[in-house]
Image (cartoon, rainbow, N blue to C red):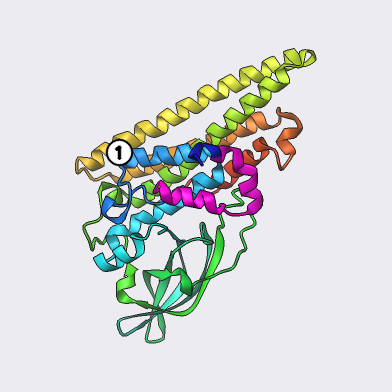
Amino acid sequence: MSILQIKERGLEIEQLGRLPEDILELIYEHQLFKLFTAKELGGQDLDLLKGMKVFQEMSALDGNFGWLVTIGTGGNAFIPTLNKEVCEKIFSPRNAVIAGSGYPTGIAIQIDEGYSVTGQWKYCSGADYATTFTMNCFVEKEGIRTDEIISCSVNSDHVEVLNDWRAMGLKATASHTIRVQNVWVPQEDTFQLGTMKNTYGNAVHSFPFGAFAEASFLSVCLGITENFLEEASILVKQRSLDSSRAEHMGAIQFLLMQQQKNFRQLEERFYAMLHEYWQKHQEGHELADEELQQFSLMSKDVAAACVDIANSLIRRLGMDAITETSSINRIWRNLYTAAQHGFITP
C-alpha cells in the first residue's frame, strides 16, 4: 500500500475510530512517528522545516492521519531529556510512540528514589497504540502537595485507557482520557523539558517548545485546509456541468479561486517566518520573547484564517456539505477540531 492511498480511506478511518493496522504498519515502515528521532534510534533525524512540511503533506491526505503523525512525532521532543538507557528503551523499538498530556492533573508522591503516581489526563491522542505515556504531576512531599511539577514516563502496560473521545471531528485520533493508580515511577523515568541528559538530541529539540507546538498544529491545519480546497474544487467542477446553474457556479468558482490564492499567501507567511526563526536558532541566536509572541500571534491568525476559508465555501457546496459521510463534511469537521487546540485558538 502507498501512503497516497490513505486519501481514499478517510471515511473508513473515521468509521473505525482508529487507524487500521495496515496504516499503522505503514507509519512504522516509513518512520513517521520518528521524524525528529536520531538515526541511531531508528528515526529520520529531519530538520524542523522538513518535518513541518511532512505534517502538512500527511494532513492533506487525511486529517486523522496527519494529526496522529504530528502528535506521535511531537513525543520526540522528550528524547534528550531522558538518560541514555531510558531513552534507548523508550525510543528504539520500531513501533515506539508516546502519547500523553502536558496538563498537571496527577499527583506524584515522592518516595525514596522515585514517585507513586495517581491521576487522570484528558485528550491523549494515539492512546490505543502508544507504547509509552507521558504525564505531568504535582509533587507531594511528606503529605503536602507542592507547586513543583514533574514529568513522568510510564509504560503502556500500567496505564488504563478510558475510550471517551467523542469530538465532532478527528474521530479516529483515539484522543482518550488515560488513568493510573499508584503506579511506581523511578526517578530515571522522570524528565524536565530543557534538561539534556544524552547526546541523541538535535537542533529541533532545543527549539522553543511553545513555537514548536504551534508550528506543528498549524501545519496540520494547513494540510487539512489544502485538502478542503481540493475537494471543494472537485465539487464545484461537478456542479458546473449543470448549464442551468452556470451563473451561480461562476460566482462560486471565483470565490474558490480567491480562497486558493488566500491559502497560498497564508502558507507562505507561515513558512517564511518559520524559516527565519529556524535559521536564527541554527546559528545559535536565542529567540527573544517578542519574536516568540509574534510567532504565536501569527499561528493563531493563520489557523483562524484557515477556518474562515472553509466557512466561506461550505454553505455554497450543497447537500454534500451537511452529509456526514461526504468527504467535504468530514474534512471540514476535522479542520474545526484541529483548529480548536489550545496552542492555536484565539
Residue 315 % position (x, y): 71, 31
In front: 7, or 132?
A: 7
The residue beneath circle 1 is: 277
Residue at (72% x, 21% y) in the render: 239
Q: Residue at x 60, y 42 (%)?
A: 9
State the image coordinates of residue 53 (x, y, percent, origin top left).
40, 37
Query: Mark 1 belongs to which amino acid?
Result: Tyr
Helix, strand or loop: magenta stretch:
helix
Is 267 above or below relative to 78?
above
In this picture, residue 201 sits left or right of residue 228: left
289 left or right of 225? Answer: left
The residue closer to the viewer here, 289 or 12, is 12
Q: Is residue 221 visible?
A: no
Q: Residues within 10 Å of mark 1 (few under 14, many from 20)?
A: many
Q: Is residue 133 magenta?
A: no
Is 14 a magenta residue?
Answer: yes
Q: Is residue 203 above or below residue 311?
A: below
Q: Secondary structure at mark 1?
A: helix
Q: Residue at x 35, y 64 (%)?
A: 90
Which contiguous range is marked in magenta? 6-32
In the rendered image, the residue lying farthest to the left is 284
227 versus 65 height, above or below: above
Q: Position of residue 101 (x, y in %)?
A: 46, 62
